[in-house]
Image (spheres, helix red, strand yellow):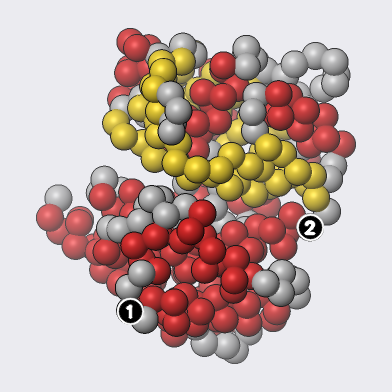
Amino acid sequence: MHRSLPPSFAIFGAGAVGCYFGALLARAGYPLQLIGRAAHVQAIAAHGLRLQTATEDVHVPLAASTEARAAAQANVVLLCVKATDTESAAQQLAPHLRPGAVVLCLQNGVDNAERVRAVLGPAHPVWPAVVYVATAMAGPGHVQHLGRCELVLPDASACAAIAPWLQQAGIAVALSDQVAGALWAKLVVNCAYNALSAIVQQPYGWLLQQDGAAALLAQLVAECQAVAQAEGVPLPADLPARVQAIAQTMPAQKSSTAQDLARGRESEIEHLNGFIVRRAAAHGLTAPANQALLVLVRMLQARQKLLN
């Protein structure tokens, strides 16, 4: 990609994260295709994408499609699907990606880029991105922004070329040679908050106000830290304090897992607390707090299937 030319973007996965970043990129004037479910695409075609923030409520016109082939002209693809859909999304995109198109994985979990590379092969650069943003879908084609707007990308030439264009769209971007550790740090945050928020359907600020919640979060973090150490992944020494601080920086945010359960959709729990439980077992460790939350969310999902 030539640095002097603005890239053309496709966003595969028009959920809260994909819609929010799509709105920012479209407002910056970049060629963009948003690919998502029919309900979102129809609403966007009729009215534009509704972007609601603390300071504005606007409709952003942009192109949207339900078909993976809409990504054919993009030289940067932001993959924003759930971790459960990573391989399926890569398989759908594979026949349509232009040669050399860069794929950035804006997803929860630590192994999505590897899973995409296994499908696409070496023809396409695939990089993980660490996403810090609080968003929610309030309805078809209606995204709400609740806080933060930051990406951490690998310190690679392809990412360095893309970063200035993302920044011009209002997205804070940092390049780092420690993305693996940052992905793990975010995984720890997700393991601490996502399942709890889902089980009680409450935001992060409310969670930490409850008696015993701080101690439970500390136990969840300690179990994740033990697994990361066994995996050879260094984590920030102040990570426990950072996790506790999330309740202050994103007090109104409900987790993506909570939003999934509220809509009757399969969550990413197997790639969050489930991942920690499996890796703990592989190293001869136990993660009882993560195991308990995993089982509870599985039960809630099974109950939804019975009711449906």
The tag earlier along the polypeptide, 1 or 2, is: 2
Residue at screen point 72% across, 63% down: 181
Numbered mark located on residue 211 in the image: 1
Residue at screen point 64% across, 63% down: 184
Residue at screen point 60% across, 46% down: 131
In the image, residue 139 above or below residue 282: above
Instruction: Locate residue 296 relative to residue 117 in the image: left or right.
Output: left
Residue 51 visible somewhere in the drawing: no
Instruction: Locate residue 306 relative to residue 136 in the image: left or right.
Output: left
Number of marks in picture: 2
Numbered mark located on residue 245 in the image: none
Amino acid type at mark 1: Asp
Residue 181 visible somewhere in the drawing: yes
In the image, residue 224 above or below residue 188: below
The mark lying in front, picked from 1 and 2, is 1
Q: Which is nearer the eye, 14 or 205?
A: 205
> Badge 1: few (under 14), some or many (20 or more) residues near its Cα, within 10 Å?
few
User: Label 2's element?
Assistant: loop
Q: Quadrant of the N terminus?
A: top right
Q: Which is nearer the eye, 249 or 10?
A: 249
> Badge 2: few (under 14), some or many (20 or more) residues near its Cα, within 10 Å?
some
Q: Which is nearer the eye, 44 or 209?
A: 209
In the image, residue 284 above or below residue 22: below
User: Label 1's element?
Assistant: loop
Q: Label 1 vs label 2: CA separation?
A: 35 Å
The residue singled out by tag 2 in the image is 178
In the image, residue 74 above or below residue 306: above
Image position, residue 151 (x, y; %): 66, 43
